[in-house]
Amino acid sequence: MEIFIGTEAECDELGAREIANQIKSKPDCVLGLATGSTPEGIYRKLVEKHRNGEVSFARVTTFNLDEYVGIPESHECSYHYFMDTNLFRHVDIRPGATHVPNGNAPDLNAECKRYEEMIAQSGGIDLQLLGIGPNGHIGFNEPGTPFESLTHVVDLTESTINANSRFFESHDQVPRQAVTMGIKSIMQARRIILVAKGASKARVIMKAIKGPVTPKVPASVLQLHPNVLIILDHDAASELTSCIK
Ligand code: GLP
């Protein structure tokens, strides 16, 4: 596991550069993408790199980690909307090459199966970008999720509902369920980049990187992956650096 610690701007630049390099070395690569406030800066930098002519998404395929259940794709808090406004509409990615789970599918279990099959048919994910929830979740894999899990429907924990309520008008409007790629789906990616920013992530980053590998801290599973880069700003790294000193 490689760890980079820097300013927020350095984290965004490194994340964007890693994704751009992945695309340059394999123009038809498959990217696993994440939402949340953490990757916004990385997407801004990627859009800049596209506008500078440094990177083209023309042959790229993407799969997003997750989506809420029961809000329309056009809802400002949906992950479809997030990806469209933060990345897809600003780059030359083909319509149809971007995939986000359908949280409005009439049969959600069938949707999970279909999503997992599409990832496999695409040849699997070359590079998976991840954020981390304050409780250690990756995607929407809440504490206790089995490491063998594939794409599934999840009941969000109260802590995640609270953490994500800042994006919604009120706590009551936060969906109670989501569709998420599972831990195994994530671990099958050939390379994983997890990004964390801010002091509110310092404790969980310490647990995920230095603590025991346990489903109680879903991100700790990354210790078992052979090709992981962790990108941290100084605040998110503060508990790690104070233990090294
Ligand atoms: C959501 C997403 C996660 C994301 C997490 C952290 O719950 N499902 O994929 O990592 O939020 O979000 P933020 O980056 O806003 O702290």
Image: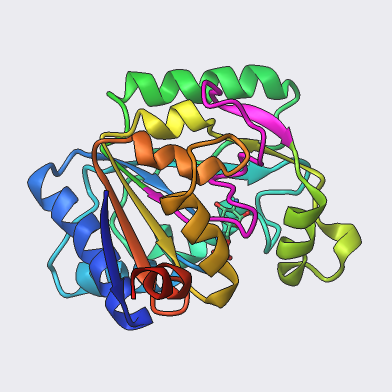
Question: Is any atom of residue 83 visible in this view?
Answer: no
User: In screen coordinates, is 70 left or right of 3?
Assistant: right
Q: Main secondary structure of the magenta part?
A: loop
* Magenta part of the chain: 129-154
The residue lying toward the viewer, choosing from 104 and 141, is 141
Q: Give the answer, above or below, for where 243 lies relative to 3.
A: below
The residue lying toward the viewer, choosing from 218 and 244, is 244
Residue at image location 28% in from the left, 56% down from the top: 92
**The quarter of the displayed image where residue 241 is located:** bottom left
For the C terminus, the image quarter is bottom left
The residue lying toward the viewer, choosing from 233 and 15, is 233
User: Residue 5 at what x, y percent from top left?
Assistant: 30, 72
Residue at image location 62% in from the left, 23% down from the top: 111
User: Residue 58 at what x, y percent from top left?
Assistant: 22, 48
Tell me the quadrant of ligand 1. bottom right
User: Residue 221 at what x, y percent from top left?
Assistant: 45, 37
The outermost residue toward the right is 172
